Image (cartoon, rainbow, N blue to C red):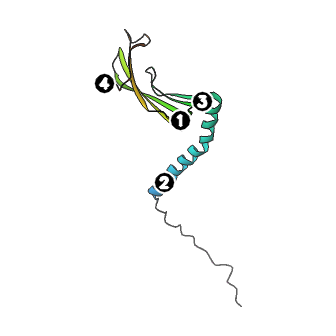
Amino acid sequence: MSTPPNNVQVRYVPAPPKKINWARRLGCGIALVFWFALLLLPSVFLILLFNNEITITTGDAPDQQIYIYLISEARERGIGVRTGSVASRDDTNVCVQTEQRYLLWQGTGEPATFCECYSRSSANESWSLATSEPNACPAR
């Protein structure tokens, strides 16, 4: 059996770079976001269990927030979600449309929409409730 000579020179040639598959990377990124959301879901339920509510402010108008709360009444049990969004706004007036939805495992709850308009005399003052209607805000 013959052995190779010791003085053989090995030449390394770099491989061409691989093409990046952006669709695959985007899919992995989306899957990672969903995975972390799934991991955080028990934390959300624990916060609801101990505090009975979660409030997330989404703007500077009054009642412009996402409000998630636990319902534990005698005939209804579940989770309520109330979201407020600005329907119309200027310097001294703002109307916030609030939508109420329920996820109940006992009892029933009808979704509701109502409109609350606030006013102030100048931009430095705080908002005060002007009108409240049990319907959606009028289109302006």
Q: Is residue 43 left or right of residue 121?
A: right
Helix, strand or loop at label 3? It is loop
- Circle 2 packing at 10 Å, graded few (<14), some (14-19), many (20+), is few
Quarter of the image with the C terminus is: top left
| Magenta stretch secondary structure, dominant | loop
Q: Residue at x 48, y 29 (%)?
A: 82
Q: Earlier in the sequence, mark 2 or mark 1?
A: 2
What is the three-letter code of the residue carrying label 2? Gly
Q: Is residue 32 magenta?
A: no
Q: Earlier in the sequence, mark 2 or mark 3?
A: 2
Q: Residue at x 66, y 78 (%)?
A: 7
Helix, strand or loop at label 2? It is helix
Query: What is the spatial separation of the Cα atoms under label 4 and label 3, in whole angstroms?
Result: 36 Å
Q: Position of residue 16 (x, y in %)?
A: 49, 66
Query: What is the spatial separation of the Cα atoms under label 4 and label 1, in whole angstroms?
Result: 32 Å
Q: Is residue 96 above or below residue 10?
A: above
Q: Is residue 12 magenta?
A: yes
Q: Which mark is residue 107?
A: 1
In the image, which is nearer the foreground, mark 2 or mark 3?
3
Q: Which mark is residue 138?
A: 4
What is the three-letter code of the residue carrying label 1? Gly
Q: Start and end of the magenta stretch?
A: 1-18
What is the three-letter code of the residue carrying label 4? Pro
Q: Position of residue 103 (x, y in %)?
A: 51, 37
Residue that carries the numbered disc 3 in the rendered image: 74
Q: Which mark is residue 27?
A: 2
**Numbered disc total:** 4
Q: Residue at x 61, y 74 (%)?
A: 10
